Amino acid sequence: MMASGPPLAGYIADSTGSYAPAFYMAGGSIVTGASFYFMIYFFHKNEENVTESQTELVVVEKVTVV
């Protein structure tokens, strides 16, 4: 998949006459990938908080040894 990047950028540059759209496409894919990473990170972090709160135990009575 990464090997198709330079030929695709060259094709876009040849068809538009400028490298700007190719750079925008490359930057857009980086921003899109990073945003997916952060969304997954924050959703996974929220799931861990829910799991921790469900597994906590409340001590109702203190047991002592006489």
Image: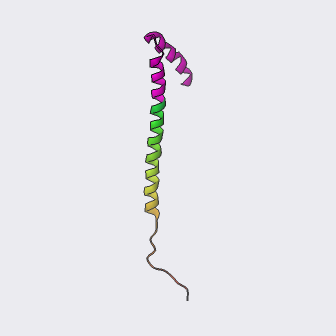
Q: Which residues are magenta?
A: 1-29
Residue 66 horizontal side relative to residue 17, left or right: right
The number of callouts visible is: 0
Q: Position of residue 5 (x, y in %)?
A: 53, 21
| Residue at (47% x, 19% y) in the render | 22
Q: Nearer the viewer, residue 53 or 34?
A: 34
Q: Magenta stretch containing residue 4, yes or no?
A: yes
Is 66 above or below relative to 62? below
Is 11 above or below relative to 58? above
Of the 4 image quadrants, the one containing the N terminus is: top right
Q: Position of residue 50 (x, y in %)?
A: 42, 56
| Residue at (50% x, 17% y) in the render | 9
Q: Magenta stretch containing residue 32, yes or no?
A: no
| Residue at (45% x, 10% y) in the render | 17
Q: Nearer the viewer, residue 20 or 1?
A: 20
Q: Position of residue 2 (x, y in %)?
A: 55, 24
Of the 4 image quadrants, the one containing the C terminus is: bottom right
Judging from the image, the colouring scheme is rainbow
| Residue at (53% x, 16% y) in the render | 7
* Magenta portion: prevailing SS class: helix
